[in-house]
Amino acid sequence: MLCFRLSLLPSLGLVLLCLLLGASQSYAIEIALKNSGGDICLYAKWQMNFTIHYEAENKTSKTATISDFTGMNYNESKCRDDNNHSQIVVQIGSSFSWIANFTMEASNYLIDAVSFTYNLSDASIFPDAAKTGSVTVDHPVTIKVPLNDNFRCNSVLTVPVDEVQERYWDILVQPFGKKSKNEFLCDEDKISTTIAPIIIHTTVPSPTMPTPKGNPAVGNYTITNVNGTCLLATMGLQLNITQDKSPFIININPNVTNFTGSCHPQTAQLRLNNSIIKYLDFVFATKNGNRFYLKEVNASISLTNGSDFSIANNNLSYWDAPLGSSYMCNKEQTLSVSEIFQINTFNLRIQPFNVKEGKYSTAEECSADSDLNFLIPVAVGVALGSLIIVVFISYMIGRRKSRTGYQTV
């Protein structure tokens, strides 16, 4: 656990807690601003990361991911002012800043807008960038929330703005006071609550989750945009989790699982959720302008022992295939997100880019499915058989010569 205590601002106390979650580049940020009377006047807790596409000097496209917020400060954040505005300002060194604006209106408050600024001049983050200087991207939000309610959104909110893809999840915010017992859920969380619930007994914690019998059912997932079908996925999914040294195995049932997603020129996302999986995100990216791969997996899952498991890894490299094709692996394949979280896939086929007429393109097969795997034992058998024949013929020739040598004249 990392804890930071920042210096006091005039008439305002600032306490910041940053808690490292799980096993991979995912930080929960918690901030509580206090007024001069010592009362909390703004509370927020959330997770976020950013993927930035930029042009390199050789005219190729590169990607930078921001998920480590070590060294950040909130010195410019403020509670409600005379204009009924409050603001969270996150400064990450000299290269990044993030601002969220809130406005009070009568009995409601608005989450107005979010802006993100990054500095292409920082060569340690943007090597070989063709351009330099700071770039700011803004997007309006306009979410109206009852004044005395917390705003909560556990689901992953993906916001593409220009060359930046912003992701936010596990959000809890009350910008005009302390935390309330009342909560206003985002639309994405409301969708997940419509699924038939699976009863989870938490009064007597269970050390393990029963191992599912057999392989998981195969689900078909299709994402569309204004241009038609943009992402196709077919797969059976089995989740393997280790929490507090206890193993949990979950087979995803596609019949009670919702899915959403988004498609962009260089990134695509498929998100699954059901009554125990708050979200399971597969994020795809392009590379070198001619291939795609699975770059990121984010997950938040409720376990049968009453605990929540959250993890994010945006540095993966699975399911690599040429753009314009699909990736296929019918045999069981293990996707290792971290040491404590693996996903087993069955009858997998995925195409996150360049889908035509709503159908899969020619598949790039995984090595386990390749016909070459069947040829190897055949080739070895043929080689051994040939060797035996050669040895046998050599033996027979040698034997004949030996007999000829003993003939009388």
Image: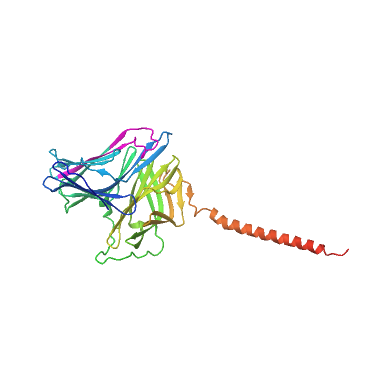
* Residue at image location 43% in from the left, 49% down from the top: 319
273 and 191: which is toward the camera: 273
Q: Is residue 165 above or below residue 347?
A: above
6 and 282: which is toward the camera: 6
Does any portion of residue 299 appear in the rendered image?
no
Q: How is the image coloured?
A: rainbow
Q: Position of residue 354 (x, y in %)?
A: 42, 42
Q: Position of residue 88 (x, y in %)?
A: 21, 42
Membership of 130 in magenta stretch: yes
357 and 70: which is toward the camera: 70
How many numbered tags mark residues here?
Answer: 0
Q: Extreme bottom residue here?
A: 204
Q: Extreme right residue here?
A: 409
192 and 245: which is toward the camera: 245
* Residue at image location 17% in from the left, 53% down from the top: 182
Does any portion of residue 241 appear in the rendered image?
yes
Membership of 125 in magenta stretch: yes
Give the position of the C terminus as an image quadrant: bottom right
Residue 327 falls left or right of residue 202: right
Q: Position of residue 71 (x, y in %)?
A: 28, 44
Q: Position of residue 153 (x, y in %)?
A: 25, 50
The residue range painted magenta reads 108-137
